[in-house]
Image (tube, rainbow, N blue to C red):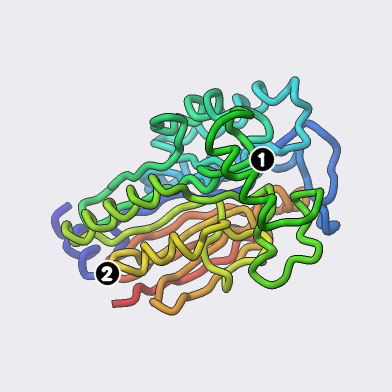
Amino acid sequence: MGSANALSRQGNLPILSFGIISDVQHADIPDGRSFIGVPRYYRHSILILQRAVQRWNEGKKHKFVINFGDIVDGFCPKDQSLSTVKKVVEEFEKFDGPVYHMIGNHCLYNLPRDNLLPMLKIPSEDGCAYYDFSPTPEFRFVVLDGYDISAIGWPQDHPKRLEAVKFLQEKNPNSEKNSPEGLVGLERRFLMFNGAVGKEQLKWLDGILQEATNMRQKVVICCHLPLDPGSTSREALLWNFDEVMDVIHKYNCVKVCIAGHDHKGGHSIDTHGIHHRVLEAALECPPGTDAFGYMDLYNDKLSLIGTDRMESTEMCFNP
């Protein structure tokens, strides 16, 4: 074992590998289309997840799986929300190892946070869904809660919901708060299906990155909502992506940010050399096609090996 580890430290073998999938958005309803007319295959998407789990289990080489949110679609009939979330979670649990989830807007259309978080085994304090884990001493994964400040998922009178509603009223003059009509450039992100990272979480993130820097760890950031305008359409960005990136750019430890939400996928490298990879959605794969993959983690890069519609991407770290 020692020699394999020594090799992986030199960058020849990965330190570890993990499975990835995003935006399964399953529902037992006929196929439909997105607001802009892209076909969506609600029943087929769970088959993609089943094939993904089977593939991840085959080689026994993947240490864990990360799901980037939106496991059940917002059009799922509400009387089926609980059973459909359970059904999809059960498919994830067939993976031989830990599965790390994050919440997306479609999850929150179906169930309130207090129901959802225990089902996804998200470690939570006061209903918040951000956490970190370190699968190997050299690396830390940080999972952000992009709907910390949000008009969905919190009780009607919750301060975080009220803050989000007030924010949207100020930023988006449309009566339909999911419409970007009349909004220009980066303002087009001020939509109800997006959200923000709150002040407490920003403070927590700063502390985590300080700690990772002290421990000489490299960091991978995971969030349902994209954090860089170069990697995604403006309508899909986290409301306060700029504040989050200001915290991240204070340190040199973050190497890659991975997201879902924008179904077509994307990749960019920001001004500080950090890679931003938005994952292609399982939901928009026609029957017989797939979108999932795995990532090989090395000391100096993260390699995404995609299946079918998920594009493979080599992400070399900025020294």
Element on which disc 2 rests: loop
Spatial CA span between label 2 and label 1? 38 Å
Q: Closest to the observer: 183 or 37? A: 183
15 horizontally vs 6: left or right: right
Relative to 291, 198 lies left or right: left
Residue at image position (33%, 48%) is 204
Which residue: 39% across, 36% down? 97
Helix, strand or loop at mark 1: helix
Q: Is residue 49 visible?
A: yes
Identify the amino acid type marked 2: Gly
Question: In which image quadrant can residue 79 be found?
Answer: top right
* Above or below: residue 144 compared with residue 241: above
Residue in the picture at 48% in, 63% down: 304
Quadrant into which the C terminus falls? bottom left
**Nearer to the camera, 2 or 115:** 115
Q: Where does label 2 land, which residue?
A: 11
Residue type marked 1 = His
Q: Is residue 12 visible?
A: no
Find residue 258 and report its horizontal and vertical position in percent: 48, 58
Task: Count residues near mark 1 (Cα–Cα under 10 Å), then give few for <14, some for 14-19, many for 20+.
Answer: many
Q: Is residue 106 above or below residue 248?
A: above
User: Mark 1 — residue?
Assistant: 106
How crowded pointer 2 is (Cα within 10 Å; few <14, some 14-19, many 20+) is rated as: some
